[in-house]
Amino acid sequence: MNIHHLELFYYVAKHGGISEAVRNIPYGIQQPAVSGQIIQLEEFLGVTLFQRRPFALSPVGQELYQFIQPFFDNLQPVSDKLRGSAYQRIRIGASEVVLREHLPGVLQTVRRKFPKLKVMLRQGYQPELESWVQQQELDLAVTLLEGKPPAGINSLPLLKLPLVLLVEKSSRLRSAAELWQRDRIEETLISLPPNESICKNFQQGLSRLGVDWFTGIEVSSLDLIETYVINGYGIGLTVQVPKTEFPPQVRSLPLEDFAPVTLGVMWMGKPNPLLQALLNEMQSRAEHLLKQSTS
C-alpha cells in the first residue's frame, strides 16, 4: 500500500472532496493527479472509498479514514516541533544580490533566537526558485512575485521595485523618453532572461509605447548588468532598491510609466517557528526600508 495514496485520501476525506483537498494540500498537486491516485488506492483495496457527487464516504472509506486520521493529524505538529527546536535547518533560495547584500543581516538576527540554525543557500532565477519551492527542494524563496502563486504555494509581498535603465555616467541621455522618440534604438539592451518579471514588465511598457527594443546581451544577475554597462556594452535594465546606490560609473534613468515588480517570499505549507521568524524579520526590514525611502 502506497502511503502517499493514503495521505491524499486523508485530505479528500478531511475536506469533503477532491477539489477542496487540492486547495488544502500543503504542496502543489493538480486535481487529476489526486483523482488518479485515489482510483489506484481503491483498485488496490478492491473497494469504493467514497461517493463522488455528492461527496460522501462509504462505510469502508469511513473506517479507513478513522484508522489513518490520528497519524496524519499529528504529522504536521510533530514536524513543526522537530524543525522548531532540535532540527533548526532551512533551505533558502534567492538571487545573488539578495544572498549577498540582504540575507546575511536577516540570518544574523534570526540566529539569536535559533542558535543551532543551519542554512543551505541556493542561487537561482525567478522561475527556478518557484519550481524548487514546488518540488520541496527549498523551504523559502526570496524572489519576484508574478500574479497568483501556483496551488499550494504561499506568498508574501515585501517591496515594490521600480524599473530603471542604467547608462554610463558619460552618456548624453538624460531621460528614457529620449530613446522612445527615436525611429530606432541603436544601443544594446542588457537584461535578465525574458521570462523574468523585470523583462516582461519592460516589454509590456514598450509595447504600449509602440517601441521595439529587445535584449541584445542576456545575463544571469543584476550585478552583471552593472558590470557590462560600466564596460560600455550598452544600456542596462534593472530595478531600484530603496536605500541602495548604483556604482559611481553609471547613472539611472527612471521608467516612471512602466509597471514595477514585486519582491516577496514564497513557501509551502504552514510555517514552522523558524520559517515564521524569518518571514517576520524580512517583513520588518522591508517596512523599515520603505519608511526610509519615503522620509
Image: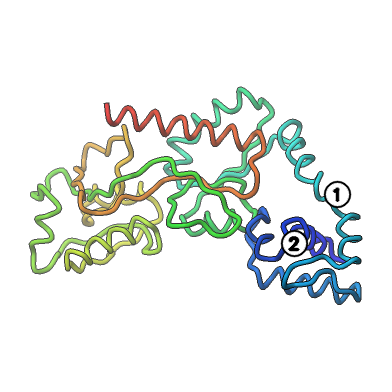
Q: Residue furthest top?
A: 112
Mark 1, residues whose alpha carbon is within 10 Å: few (<14), some, or many (≥20)?
A: few
Q: Quadrant of the N terminus?
A: bottom right
Q: Amino acid at mark 1?
A: Phe
Residue 55 quadrant: bottom right
In the rendered image, residue 102, in percent from the top left (x then y), is placed at 45, 35
Q: Is residue 217 left or right of residue 235?
A: right
- Quadrant of image for the C terminus: top left
Would residue 254 be found to the left or right of residue 192 on screen? left
Q: Camera-side residue: 18 or 196? A: 18
Q: Nearer the viewer, residue 187 or 294?
A: 294
Q: Residue at horizontal 58%, vertical 28%?
A: 110
* Residue identifier under label 2: 12
Number of the label disc, if any, that sits on residue 238: none
Badge 2 marks a residue whose secondary structure is helix
**Mark 2 and 1 residues: CB-CB less than 8 Å, in contact?**
no
Q: Is residue 113 left or right of residue 123?
A: right
Residue at x 30% of width, y 62% of height: 217
Question: What residue is shown with label 1?
Answer: 71
Give the image location of residue 106, x and y in percent.
51, 31
For residue 283, above or below residue 267: above
Residue at 56 percent of width and 49 percent of height:
154
Three-letter amino acid code at the position of disc 2: Val
Q: Secondary structure at mark 1?
A: helix
Position of residue 189 measured from the top left corner of the image (x, y, whole percent): 24, 60
First in sequence: mark 2 vs mark 1: 2
Is residue 21 rendered to the left or right of residue 131? right
Answer above or below: position of 15 versus 254. below
| Residue 96 percent location from the top left of the image | 45, 45
Q: Nearer the viewer, mark 2 or mark 1?
A: 2
